[in-house]
Image (spheres, grey):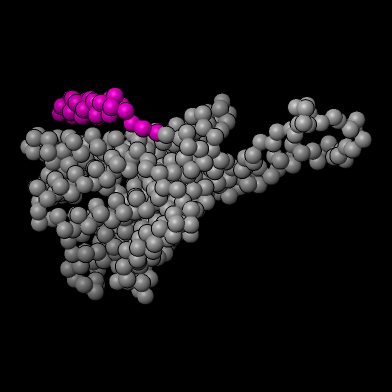
Amino acid sequence: MAAWVVCALCALVIIKPQEFIPALAGIPLVHAAFGITLLCVALDVVWRRLKPALAPQVVYALAFLAWAALTTALKRPDALEERGMQLATVAGIFVAISVAAASPRGLRALAITLVGCAVITTVVAIVQSFRPHGCMIAAPDDWEGKGELEPDGRPCETNLDCRVDAPVPDGNYRCERPGPLGTSTIDGRVRYRGSLADPNELSLMAGMSIPLAIALAERRAGPRRRPRRSAGGRAPPSDGGARRAPTLPVLLTDRLLSRVAAALRALPVTAIIAAIGAMVVLSRSRSGVIVYLAVLGISFIRRSGTLGVIAACFVGPPMLLLGGRSGDEASESSEERVELLREAFELIRRTKGIGVGAGQFGDESSLGLTAHNSYLLAAAETGLLGMCLFALVLYASMKVPLSIWLGDVDVGPTARRFAPAIFVSLCGALIGIFFLSWAYKDILYIMLGASAALYGAARAEDSRVVVRVSGREVALVCGGMVVVLVLLNVLLRFLG
């Protein structure tokens, strides 16, 4: 019961129906769903449907978010109420998923929800690309059109067309493609709305769902049946072939039928992968292309070995050719990112490694943007300690599915299927957040919560499942992050 309620909570966070359904506007759906989740978790624990287990990343995640709130209180007390509420919401969602989805049924429900949300947002984005251009007005101070746009019904081809006989003479007009659910493109790039209004973030979220879709399509591995033995320990004697199953024709063998069934099961996930690939191309997201190829390549290689490498070679070049931006727009975006990285290092030096507070990078930046790199964002806003805690959250979240996937543990088929899927999804996340500001992103913590839920589900089936982060690992992770900072600083100095 708690699993499906927490899945509804995740759907509310990602899809945000309260933003495009007027009847739901103003209703605190997320807070209500969170409260119902806590109640259902308590009932499931009392009825012994759930066995809570503390995953190693839970401690580090809560410590990181608490430290982010503390640095905000020290550096920007006036922003503590707003940022503190955001951090508390992210922490609540993360803990709720790690506990409520910690069962085989919960893992399947969570995977179905995340894949379903990716399909909905992908379809919305693809439909956008087929709509004709129309004049849309943005907020007066939103000159980049990154917020919500309102159509006024006039057709257009360029932004200048919208200024001719404009209903609002001084309005901030843009010529974009309107989409379903009150969405619109931005500079011709498809996107969703809310926290996924950035095409890069939409591409990352959809790419992270691909391994989960593949896991859902995999055939369930049933329990291994051992031959029954007699009281003396010998296998029962054969009946001499008196009873034999009827022989099937050659064209109807079990192997052929199983392959046909596998091909039919693969059709939906193939369609999902193709649709997400098309959406990534339409979003013109370079980081989205990298994440898409990474998760797809790892999944292909894991399942098919050499054939997977060959398949990845066929998929990779077209995506690299069609996806991403080029020309002056791409050069301007790259230069902007480099400048933001320089400002991140300047903030680290200026605050002596303490940070400027969560969510304050944009106010301190001369460009008014965030760092576009989650690792440097964590260092600039929460200091070196916050950066190390953030890295430990990611490391522990990766170690859990990897230990269950490759470890000598006796877990059920659901945990065996979703351990590699969650690991591959997190690999894509670690690549994607290098180009995005996702240090406190709710969608990232939903996936981190899925890793913690996997730990709880596996430990409930086998008490030998124990994943810890040793002191040596902590030192290596923190040292590795310092090395990354040094290398990035050297690279920026080399670039001038």
Instruction: Judge from the rendering whether residue 344 lies leftward or rightward of residue 234; answer left or right.
Output: left
Total labels: the figure holds 0
- Please tell me whether residue 402 belongs to the stretch shown in magenta: no
Above or below, comparing residue 369 to residue 177 in the picture: above
* Observer-nearest of 480 and 168: 480
Residue at image location 32% in from the left, 51% down from the top: 442
Q: Quadrant of residue 424?
A: top left
> Please, is residue 181 above or below residue 447 in the view?
below
Taking the view exactly as shown, the residue that stands out farthest to the front is 231
**Does the image show residue 36?**
yes
Whether residue 90 sits left or right of residue 120 in the image: it is: left
In front here: 65 or 421?
65
Q: Please name the predominant secondary structure of the magenta segment in the image.
A: helix
Q: Residue 434: give x, y in percent of width and height.
A: 29, 37
Residue 284 visible in the shown view = no
What percent of the width, then of the height, locates residue 282?
Answer: 41, 49
- Magenta residue span: 467-496
Point 46% across, 51% down: residue:
50
Check the picture and name the quadrant holding the C terminus. top left
Q: Nearer the viewer, residue 124 or 385?
A: 385
- Say which residue appears at 22% left-offset and 57% top-offset: 85
As drawn, is 256 to the left or to the right of 187? right
Task: Name which residue lies at 48% across and 59% down.
Answer: 1
> For this rendering, which residue is in front, 142 or 306?
306
Residue 337 in percent (x, y) is at 22, 39
Q: What x and y, as percent, mark residue 95?
A: 34, 50
Q: Is residue 491 magenta?
A: yes
